[in-house]
């Protein structure tokens, strides 16, 4: 998946907003071209996402939140709220920050092999490089006293299991 055109469009719009917009047909043409590139890029990404196939170790995936349609993404420059040595994980638009590489949790599995059902995997951040994996932390909320979980990204990290989930919504695991 590619998000370069969308990133270019956002940067240009932000720059124009900071400098009071700007006048001229060349700026309008440039914005139209960037918007067209972003639209084509979104169409290409949708086409890639619609091609479901088995996930293998080494594949880059995006995890989509079913209710919001947003993706789990790593905020590389922000510390996690509960674990200061970890990076923050949030729901966000599908950008490079949401790319995760599926890696084997145990050394007896190799890159390129199929990920089987109910097998522990590590989800490694593509943006932060090797060894930065999704992690979860169980803690007690100070205000309510209830147990809660924080998902963050840390060096090392824990393994995750892919489980079947259905809420009358057909879902396929897709790699990108």
Image: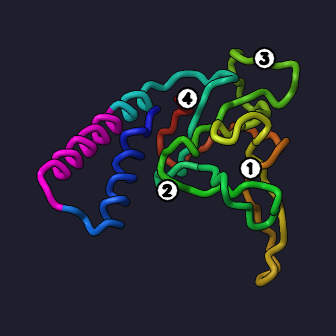
Q: Which residue is mark 1?
A: 153
Which residue corresponds to the image point at 50% horizontal and 44% vertical from the top-left? 95
Of label 1 and label 2, which has the lower sequence position?
2
Horizontal side of 97 relative to 26 (left or right) equals: right
Q: Which element carries disc 3, helix, strand or loop?
A: loop
Distance in Å between CA atoms under marks 4 and 1: 20 Å
Of label 2 and label 3, which has the lower sequence position?
2
> Where are the magenta residues, as a range?
23-43
Task: Name the disc covering residue 175, or none.
Answer: 4
Q: Which element carries disc 4, helix, strand or loop?
A: loop
Of label 2 and label 4, which has the lower sequence position?
2
Task: Report x, y in % for residue 17.
Answer: 32, 65
Q: Which residue is mark 3?
A: 110
Judge whether residue 71 is colored magenta.
no
Which residue corresponds to the image point at 41% horizontal and 30% vertical from the top-left? 50
In the image, which is nearer the foreground, mark 3 or mark 1?
A: 1
């Amino acid at each position: 998946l590619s998000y370069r055109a969308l990133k270019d469009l956002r940067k240009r719009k932000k720059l124009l907003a900071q400098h009071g917009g700007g006048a001229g047909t060349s700026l309008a043409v440039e914005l139209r071209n960037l918007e067209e590139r972003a639209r084509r890029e979104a169409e290409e990404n949708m086409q890639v996402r619609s091609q479901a196939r088995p996930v293998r170790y080494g594949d880059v995936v995006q995890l989509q939140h079913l209710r919001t349609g947003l993706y789990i993404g790593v905020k590389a420059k922000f510390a996690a709220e509960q674990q200061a040595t970890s990076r923050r994980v949030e729901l966000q638009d599908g950008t490079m920050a949401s790319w995760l590489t599926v890696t084997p949790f145990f050394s007896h599995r190799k890159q390129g092999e199929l990920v089987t059902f109910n097998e522990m995997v590590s989800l490694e951040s593509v943006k932060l490089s090797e060894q930065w994996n999704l992690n979860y932390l169980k803690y007690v909320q100070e205000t309510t006293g209830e147990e809660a979980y924080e998902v963050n990204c840390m060096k090392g990290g824990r393994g995750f299991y892919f489980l079947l989930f259905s809420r009358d919504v057909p879902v396929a695991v897709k790699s990108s």
